[in-house]
Image (spheres, rainbow, N blue to C red):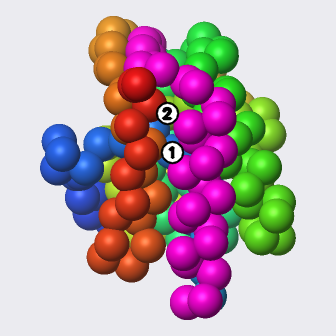
């Protein structure tokens, strides 16, 4: 088996997040209205503070197969996170942007590498889910804000009234 020599970059603790949308681009004239509608959708969803329990590791690769991620994954379908994804997806559809993955994978990435690590390792996703990354993990997180990063600007909405 070939050895993977591509470096991994670990996220700073302050950068850890749970994604509820795929990466996408906005035209400059769409930014204000998109963020306004997203804020309205978040407030209307009345999500409250979200608690997530991570219990598995998973190697994920983005759609374009240009970046791999080592991620903590929640194997439980958290209804609050799924509600947040649906609220964001509704806005994404209005702007003809891709919706979140189906089925959704509730995860927090802790490291990334600029490659398709599954191809380098010569493994299929099914093999990874069956235990190549097997150390047990238990980690819980509380989420009280939803953020949208546009360039260097971060828009933020509280989930707690």
Q: CA distance from mark 1 to mark 2?
A: 7 Å
Q: Report whether 9 appears left or right of 48.
A: left
Residue 47 located within the stretch drawn in magenta: yes
Say which of 148 and 69 sits in front.
148
Please tell me whether the stretch drawn in magenta is mainly helix, strand or loop.
helix
Asked if disc 1 and disc 2 are in contact, CB closer than 8 Å, the reply is yes
Of the image marks 1 and 2, the number of the one nearer the N terminus: 1
At 33% across and 72% down in the image, what residue appears? Answer: 153
Label 1 Cα neighbours within 10 Å, binned few <14 / some 14-19 / many ≥20:
some
Residue 46 visible in rendering: yes
Say which of 127 and 84 sits in front.
84
**Can you tell which quarter of the image residue 49 is in?**
top left
User: Residue 38 in the image: x percent, y percent?
Assistant: 60, 54
* Mark 2 element type: strand
Residue 74 located within the stretch drawn in magenta: no
Q: Report whether 89 appears left or right of 158.
A: right
At 41% across and 25% down in the image, what residue appears? Answer: 161
Q: Residue pushed farthest bottom?
A: 28
Label 2 Cα neighbours within 10 Å, binned few <14 / some 14-19 / many ≥20:
many
User: Residue 84 in the image: x percent, y percent?
Assistant: 62, 34
* Mark 1 element type: loop
Residue 113 visible in rendering: no
Range of the magenta residues?
A: 28-55
User: Residue 120 in the image: x percent, y percent?
Assistant: 52, 59
As displayed, is residue 8 above or below residue 58?
below
Residue 141 disc label:
none
Q: Which residue is labeled 1 in the image?
A: 19
As displayed, is residue 30 above or below residue 137?
below
At 56% across and 37% down in the image, what residue appears? Answer: 43
Residue 107 disc label:
2
């Amino acid at each position: 088996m070939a050895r993977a020599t591509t470096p991994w970059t670990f996220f700073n603790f302050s950068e850890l997040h749970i994604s509820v949308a795929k990466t996408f681009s906005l035209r400059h004239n769409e930014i204000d209205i998109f963020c306004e509608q997203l804020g309205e959708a978040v407030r209307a969803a009345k999500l409250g503070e979200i608690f997530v329990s991570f219990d598995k590791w998973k190697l994920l690769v983005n759609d374009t197969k240009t970046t791999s991620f080592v991620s903590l994954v929640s194997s439980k379908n958290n209804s609050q996170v799924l509600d947040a994804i649906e609220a964001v997806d509704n806005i994404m559809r209005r702007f003809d942007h891709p919706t979140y993955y189906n089925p959704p994978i509730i995860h927090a990435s802790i490291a990334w590498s600029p490659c398709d690590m599954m191809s380098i390792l010569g493994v299929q996703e099914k093999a990874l889910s069956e235990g190549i990354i097997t150390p047990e993990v238990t980690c819980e997180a509380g989420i009280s804000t939803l953020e949208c990063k546009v360039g260097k600007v971060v828009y933020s909405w509280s989930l707690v009234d």
